[in-house]
Structure formats: structure tokens, C-alpha cells
Image: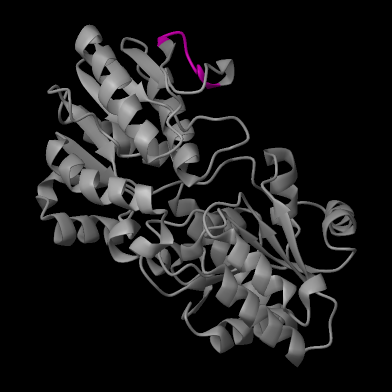
Amino acid sequence: MKIVVNTRLLRANHMDGIGWFTYNTLKYITTNNPGIEFHFLFDSGIDEQFLFSKNIVPHSLFPPAKHAILNIAWFEWSVSRYLKKANPALFLSPDGILCMGWNGKQYGVIHDINFVHIPTDLKWANRKFYSYFFPRYAVKASRLATVSEYSKNDIIKTFGTDPGKIDVVYCGINSFYKPVTEEIKKEVKKKYSRGAEFFVFVGTLHPRKNIIRLLQAFEIFKQSVSSDIKLLLVGREMFRTREMHNFRDGMRHKDDVIFTGQLPVDELKIVFASALCLTFVPYFEGFGIPPIEAMQCDVPVIASNTTSVPEVVGDAALVVDPYDTKAIANAMQRIWQEPLLRQELIVKGRIRKLAFPWDRTSKLLWESISKIL
């Protein structure tokens, strides 16, 4: 049997949540199915570290799918031509983008449909691409998966998709996240936060991550406490990030806000584990991996009370209205002033994180895929 897979988001040192979903599930699925031939389609050259097993055949197709127009060219020209030539049993797409020009079986993972609800948070071309194609992908797919019950219900309600066609496969936690020693925490603080304690945000710097309200809340917090504590914003900058920098530049406590950019994994894992708390208050998430990664590191979490986030964090986070900057600031103040609360959240996080192993995600995904093979 031959399965062709869209692996364009497997990019060393440039993976976000969907990239890690792709990495972890494909690593499990390919190694546990040696009798199946998997053809990986890359768009930016072949990286040997992503060839997890001997039954993987890699291909690099032109052009690099970096934005909406190139996405169409890659999927509807390069991928379509390849699928017609290879005639596989299935085309699997972990980022949900399918090939409208090929009529074989296709399986897509639609992580969320934020572009329907908050279209202005995307560039015009991307907004048009997602809005036009994703309702059609939901119809085209032989079967779908998504990463939360919230997203499943959203897809059903918005696209009119048959509930029996969609399976939920929660995301997992990368094994390299773990607590670190006090000595490592001290070195991290010396390098990144001028020796001070810090709150941390980890994720793509994108409007729906609600960074400006987080900055507003941090300003309120700093005005209410006497502390040199910092806020680290860790992640790749995407759309409308100039607004975030402009707001930071006008803050009274702007020197306490630090943009680190995207960090390599070896740095990210120790920065994450050295934080006083993760402040994760997006107003839209299909899943939201950082809170459970923080739990893996014994770091308490402040999280949004919207979309899928409460479903993921359960009772193991201090949940707040992401639109209420005073509520976010009050949560930061509680974390700062109440060590018993921090410890309570850490203990609850140790239990909550057990619900999200990547092996379970991968097994559920393969079970869902197998329904149409």
C-alpha cells in the first residue's frame, strides 16, 4: 500500500503547533506500519532528520508553498501531478490542505477555522484562500480529524459537515519539555531577563494570540506591585507584529518586556521551564499546546476561558477572560504573590498533562485513517 503525505511543515527550527503535530504523529505512524510505503512531499528540500523509517520515500516539489498563491500552485499543480502519477491509496494532509484536482481518497486534519470568525487577523490573500478552499476541503475529504471537541463542533456548525465524518485527536506534549534545576533557571534568567523572574508567552506572535492585551495587563500588573519581574514573548513574528512593538514602545515599563524571537528547541525548553508562569491568553485556539507543555515543565499557567482552551487545561490553570485586561493582571498578581496557588496549579498540571501523550494522538489518528483505507 502506498500513502502520500503532505510534509511541507516539517521544517527544522521553524515548526509551530501544526508542525509538531505532523512530526510526532508521522514518526509514530510510519515506524509502526513498516509494510506501508509512505511518500513524503516536501516543498523546501529534503531534510534527512524527518525520514523516520526505511519505508519513507521523500520528494521535493516546486514551488515552496509559502503563501496563498504558492499554496495553490503547489497543491493544485505539483501535488496534483504527483498524485495522478503515483496513484496512492490515500493522500494524507496534517495541515488540512487537500488537492481539489485529484479524485482519490484524501484525509485532512483541520486544526481550527479561526479565519471564519476573525478574518481580519489574516493577510488578505490568506483570508481569501482559507475562506474559499477549506469549506470545499471539508466536502472533498473522505474523512477528517481535528484536535478538540470545540473545533469539531465548530466545523460541523460552520461547514455543515456530517459529525460522523470527523474524529477528535487531541495534540500531545513533546518529550523534551521537563523541569530544570535551580542552577539552570538562574543561568536562563541571567541570559534572558537580566537576572529577574519572568512571565512567559510561547507561541507564534499573531493577532489572535492577544499579545497587545497581554501587554496592557502586564502594565497594570507592574503598576500594582514593586518588582523587577519581566515578560518574555517567545516566538516567530507573523502578521501585524509592528502593532505589538509600537505598543510596547509606549509602555511605562517597556524595558521589562522582552521579545526573544523564535528560539531553537535546546533554548526554548529551558526558557519555558525557568518561567514563573505561562501567560497564554489568546482569544481563539483550536487546541493550544503551550499550556500542557508548561505543565510538563512544572510551570503554572494563566489561560483563556474561550474556545478550546478550557477543554485542554481543565482545572489545572487560572482561567481568565482574554478581553479583560484587569482580570489578566489580577491573575498575574495572584501568581506573583501566592506561592501556594502556584504549587497547587503545578500539582494539578502534573495530573492534567497525562491526558496528552503523542502516542495516544498518533494511535487515534491512525485508527481514524484506517476507517477509509
Residue 343 lies in the magenta stretch? no
Residue placed furthest toward the bottom: 224
Q: How many marks?
A: 0
User: Going 83% across and 62% down the picture, which residue do you hit?
Assistant: 193
Q: For residue 115, what is the image quadrant?
A: bottom left
Q: Position of residue 143 (x, y in %)?
A: 17, 37
User: Going 62% across and 67% down the picture, which residue do you hit?
Assistant: 244
Q: Give the magenta range.
A: 50-56
User: Going 50% across and 16% down the picture, which residue do you hit?
Assistant: 51
Residue 52 lies in the magenta stretch? yes
Left of 31 or right of it: where is 215? Answer: right
Q: For residue 12, what is the image quadrant?
A: top right
Please tell me whether residue 20 is drawn above or below residue 124 in the rendered image: above
Q: For residue 7, what is the image quadrant?
A: top left
Left of 149 or right of it: where is 184? Answer: right
Say which quadrant the C terminus sits in: top left
Say which quadrant the N terminus sits in: top left
Which is more toward the observer, 222 or 359? 222
The answer to whether residue 341 is visible is no
